[in-house]
Amino acid sequence: MHFEFNVEGGNFSKAGTASSQLKKILKQLNVDPRIVKRVVVALYEAEVNIVAHAFSGTIYIDIDTEKIEIKLVDEGPGIPDIELAMQQGYSTASPEVREMGFGAGMGLPNMKNNTDRLLVTSEVGKGTTVEMTTYLNS
Amino acid sequence: MTIKEVVKLLDAKVVSGEALLESEVEYAFASDLMSDVLTVEMDNVMLITGLANLQAIRTAEMSDIGKIIFVRKKRATDEMIRLAAENDIILIECDYSLFKTSGILFQNGLKPVY
Ligand SMILES: Nc1ncnc2c1ncn2[C@@H]1O[C@H](COP(=O)(O)OP(=O)(O)O)[C@@H](O)[C@H]1O
Ligand SMILES: [Mg+2]
């Protein structure tokens, strides 16, 4: 099964709608609630990152009987030092993002903790791609 | 503890999920930082927060948190109430501070997450 969602940078009132849609889909497919929670928590942090740090993005989701693969591709400033960005507490978030309850530098670590595989690639000045895989029978 | 008891202890008001007053809650987590809330793995957790916006509801939805208390006279908007209702999330508004709310609930047996 394949799904796609668009994400608008800066639009906090819509942040989380893709994650919410995926949650409904996974519930309907009778996926273990603990796995659903891990997947949607990771996706939500990634979705919020596009809203908070990029201009726009697309989420591609592929589900088969073995795994859930999610790819988030955004157009934005990119991440100059990915290793640094992955560290808990590192954040360049604006005061507006903090007011929304994010921007403590916990998003990427939360994604790592809630996925079986996380790959972040980025080109400065162009954008960032986040790939997450979760296995259904682990 | 039931939601009914929580509401009574805090002299609070239920603004969404009035039909779920008899449901039980065992744990509570107090934070305004949604990334922190998203680390909570336990079930049957109530969120106590001063962050009254859509992201608090979204965070609860993703974390399977079915109860939120907004402290310090923060009010839920119609859009927040609609989103909460869609996800069977109980919303409670309370005038007490985060500290007082947490203290009362802790004293009456709600357990901490960490
Ligand atoms: N999609 C993105 N585009 C550009 N920068 C990003 C993106 N995602 C993360 N970053 C950078 O990595 C940092 C850490 O991200 P994260 O751990 O989610 O924390 P936070 O979002 O709270 O700042 C961000 O502050 C930002 O500098
Ligand atoms: Mg983030």
Image (cartoon, rainbow, N blue to C red):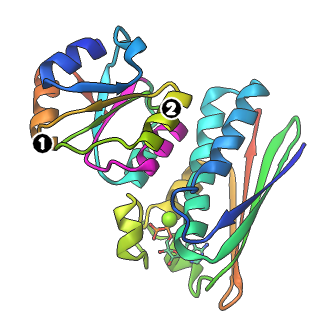
Residue A34: mark in rendering:
none
Residue depicted at x 67% and y 37%: A23
Q: Does the segment drawn in magenta span residue B56? A: yes
Earlier along the polypeptide chain: callout 1 or callout 2?
Answer: 2
Name the one closer to the observer, A125 or B71.
B71
Residue depicted at x 42% and y 12%: B19
Three-letter amino acid code at the position of disc 2: Asp
Q: Which residue is mark 1?
A: B97
What whole-number distance in Å separates the C-alpha atoms at marks 1 and 2?
25 Å
In the image: residue A117, left or right of residue A84: right
Q: Which residues are magenta?
A: B44-64
Q: Which chain hosts label 1?
A: B
Q: Callout 2: 10 Å neighbours few (<14), some, many (20+)?
A: many
Mark 2, secondary structure of its residue? loop
Residue B82 in view here: yes
For disc 1, does the CB lie below 8 Å from ligand 1? Answer: no
Q: In the image, is residue B106 above or below residue A111?
A: above
Instruction: Name the quarter where the N terminus of chain A is drawn.
Output: top right
Q: In the image, is residue B105 above or below residue A35?
A: above
Three-letter amino acid code at the position of disc 1: Ser
- Residue B18 occupies quadrant: top left
How far across and down, in percent of the image, does residue A92 sit?
43, 79
Residue depicted at x 34% and y 54%: B33
